[in-house]
Image: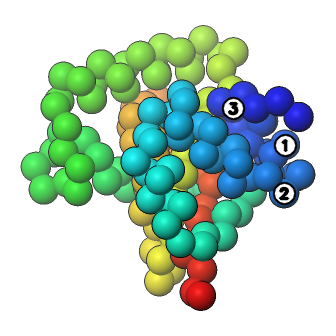
Amino acid sequence: MNYKPTTTSAIEFADNDKLEEWIHLFLCNEGDNKPFSEGLKLEPRKYYSPILMKLDLFERCCGPEEGIKYQISESGFNANVNAIMSKYKNGDWDMPPLIINRTDGKYELNDGNHRFEALKKLNIDEFWVIIWESVSK
């Protein structure tokens, strides 16, 4: 089993009880979100194999809007979204799943905000997600 930054690879790792390993490999490499990876390691978590989920069940937590949890520049955000849209429209990219947290029955998108926005702009209403939850000690 070789790691790749794809949904297919995440499913393969999940099928072999190694989804957490895939998540950290992704976040520390192509996902470029090492702080999130380090935060996940701070306490026990439960990870669920990638599933198709409606995108309207959660929202971005990162973007250029005022009042959003993690605000970034509009030009940088839009450039990344446009690049993802182009890559996805080519049809040969097995885009990695989005990573979301479930707490108290609510979902928060933690990783994949640019991918999420690209999917929404492409009028795609569902995509692969990995759901994680904190585990009580």
- Residue found at x 39% / y 35%: 114
- Work out whether mark 3 precedes mark 1 in sequence or the reverse, and give the earlier one: 3
User: On screen, 112 above or below 67?
Assistant: above
Q: Residue at 41% x, 16% y: name it.
A: 83
Q: From what the image shows, is residue 130 above or below residue 122?
A: below
Give the image location of residue 117, x and y in percent: 39, 37
Q: Is residue 58 visible?
A: no
Q: Position of residue 12 (x, y in %)?
A: 84, 43
Q: Is residue 3 above or below residue 102?
A: above
On residue 6, which mark appears? Answer: 3
Spatial CA distance of label 1 from label 2 is 9 Å
Q: Specify few, some or many for label 1: CA neighbours under 10 Å numbering under 14, 14-19, or 20 or more.
A: some
| Label 2 sits on residue | 17
Which quarter of the image is occupied by the N terminus? Answer: top right
Type of amino acid at the residue the image marks with label 1: Glu
Q: Which residue: 50% across, 50% down?
A: 37
Residue 48 left/right relative to 96: right
Separation (CA) of disc 3 from disc 1? 10 Å
Disc 3 is placed on an element classified as loop
Q: Is residue 91 visible?
A: yes
Q: Is residue 73 left or right of residue 42?
A: left
Q: Residue furthest left?
A: 66
